Image: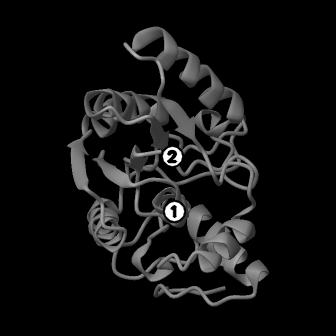
Amino acid sequence: MTRAIVLLSGGMDSLVTAGIARQECEELYFLHFSYGQRTENRELACFRAIAQHYQATAAKVIDYHWLAEIGGSSLTNSAIKIITDTPSGIPNSYVPFRNATMLCAATAWAEALGATAVYIGAVEEDSSGYPDCRQSFFEAFEKLIQEGTVKADIVIKTPVLELSKAQIVQRGIAINAPFELSWSCYCSEEAACGTCPSCLLRLKAFAEAGLPDPIPYEVKP
């Protein structure tokens, strides 16, 4: 493929996805969303560093603070305690329909550029169980693209979707992904808290892969 959009949060899943896209595409266009997440500033810094590392042709940041304004997520409201054990089985850090709205923006940019793929670092196998991280969701979104775009040739690429977190670490090491530039913590920006669900998943992944995590932690279980 010649051109592709890469959705890049700054986390380790999107980092490895970006590295895979770098191997498969000639031109990469990185897209980041600031939506009032608790670690917005650190994620933005990581995005810029990773975009520079992978020599993105262009990198854009979209203001999506309306997602924080509508509420409904502990990820955008620090007054809400992050809970993974909920009656629905979906952690309350789920941001309502976030991935769909982001994919809409990415698809629009792809169509304008003539790009034929949108990469997203979603994980279904070993993650939080968000409904917009399922294979069936991305298949449905591709059908939406086919119905709603002119050339209908844009595909959604999810290269880490079926990998465990440990496998993502291993894949990243294999392609020399700079994990030190990524950030996964839901709560802290200077040093990762080490106790939030995302930190625990990341620490477990590196431990299972038998590798040290290069980012700083306040607490490292």
Q: Horizontal and vertical percent for residue 76? A: 37, 47
Quick one: 62 or 141, which is closer to the camera? 141
What is the C-alpha distance between the residues marked 2 and 1? 15 Å
Quarter holding residue 44: bottom left
Q: As shown in the figure, which amino acid type bears the numbered disc 1?
A: Gln
Horizontal placement of 148 versus 46: left or right? right
Q: Amino acid at mark 2?
A: Ile
Q: What kind of element bears circle 2?
A: loop
| Colour basis | one colour
Seen in the picture, residue 67 relative to 77 is either above or below; the reply is above
Say whether marks 2 and 1 touch (CB < 8 Å): no
Residue 195 in picture, x, y percent from top left: 58, 73
Nearest to the observer: residue 74 or residue 184: 184
Q: Is residue 145 above or below residue 57?
A: above
**Where on the picture, by quarter, is residue 70?**
top left
Q: Residues within 10 Å of mark 1 (few under 14, many from 20)?
A: few
What is the number of the mark on residue 143? none
The crowd level at tag 2 (other Cα within 10 Å; few <14, some 14-19, many 20+) is many
Q: Is residue 196 visible?
A: no
Label 2, on which residue? Answer: 120
Would residue 33 appear left or right of 174 to someone viewing this image? Answer: left
Of badges 2 and 1, the one in the foreground is 1
- The count of marks equals 2
Mark 2 or mark 1, earlier in chain: 1
* Quadrant in which residue 16 is drawn: bottom right
Q: Give coordinates of residue 171: x percent, y percent.
A: 66, 70
Residue assigned mark 1: 23
- Measuring 74% from the left and 50% from the top, which residue is drawn there? 162
